Amino acid sequence: MKTVVITGSARGFGLCQAKKFKSLGCNVVLSDVNEENLKKAAAELENVGPKDTKVIRTLCDVTDCEALQRLWNLAKETFGTVDIWVNNAGVNSPDKPVCELTQKEIGFLLDIDLKGTIYGSKIAFAGMKEQGFGQIYNVEGYGSNDAMMTGLTLYGTAKRAVTYFTRSLAKESHDVTGDKVCVCRLTPGIMITDFIKTANGGATRIELPEKTKKVYNILGDYPETIVEYAVPRMLQNTKNDARIMWLTNRRAFGRFLTAGFKKRDFFS
């Protein structure tokens, strides 16, 4: 039975991943900075999946390496091994040009979206190197493919850096562990959650322009749809530097072709 650790898993995409992993027979370690949300998430997972699977939860701030080390230690001590570690925690950027962002807003996003991924990968990689196996998944996002848009420059910068970091760490794993530790990318595309409507960790609401809503209606999906595709492939993967990608160019092209007669509205 595999054990999966997911950061930022008290709600949204992280929680949906947790539910799917547990439904497929995995033990799951939930982590987040919000205790109340963690309690609710753990309660939702209790009756998911086979009866011999377990879920535990713990508070964890991904900007703190010591907290991440405690997360690893808890999972290892409880279940013996950690098979998959997903650096899922992230925040959105306020919808405004970089020149209007405060120093606090810039630091907050980079600390969580970029440094949090690096710190989590560092801790998980060290533990997996010692145990001799494991998979790390880092979540790509807007900007990972060099896409650019006013209001998403900072977020895109962080995600582009995550892509480079993940691929370079995969090369390090090849050199250091002989690919025993797989460092991979999870590319969900546009997800319809509260994430796209909020910034600064949910403290700031974002009013999406109608043009953006139109694109999201064509290309977006609920996270429940995405995990049905992604999680089984994450469990089956044995390849270092793999990329589990939902919104492929082919799928996006098909969506635009059929948009005229397949109406979707996530914002009504």
Image: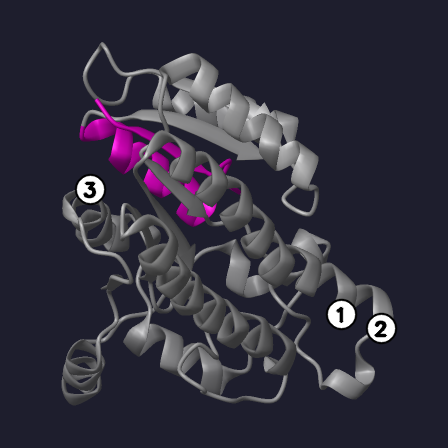
Say whether residue 148 is visible: yes
Q: Which residue, given by chain and number where applicable, does mark 2 sit on?
A: 102
To which quarter of the image does residue 69 belong?
top right
The amino acid on which the numbered mark 1 sits, given as a three-letter code, is Ile
Residue 78 forms part of the magenta stretch: no
Residue 18 forms part of the magenta stretch: yes
The amino acid on which the numbered mark 2 sits, given as a three-letter code, is Thr
Q: Which residue, given by chain and number where applicable, does mark 1 sit on?
A: 106
Q: Nearer the viewer, residue 154 or 176?
A: 176
Relative to residue 86, is residue 189 depicted above or below?
A: below
Q: Nearer the viewer, residue 268 or 155?
A: 155
The magenta span reads 1-24
Q: Secondary structure at mark 2?
A: loop
Residue at position x 19%, y 87% in the image = 260
Residue at position x 27%, y 34% in the image = 21
The amino acid on which the numbered mark 3 sits, given as a three-letter code, is Leu
Q: Position of residue 199 (x, y in %)?
A: 66, 62
Q: Secondary structure at mark 3?
A: helix
- The answer to whether the residues at label 2 and label 1 have Cβ atoms under 8 Å apart is yes
Q: Position of residue 1 (x, y in %)?
A: 21, 22
Disc 1 and disc 3: Cα gap in Å?
A: 35 Å
Q: Residue furthest right?
A: 103
**Chain-order first, disc 1 or disc 3:** 1
Q: Which residue, given by chain and number where applicable, does mark 3 sit on?
A: 235
Residue at position x 17%, y 45% in the image = 232
Say whether residue 184 is visible: no
Q: Left or right: 11 with respect to 79? A: right
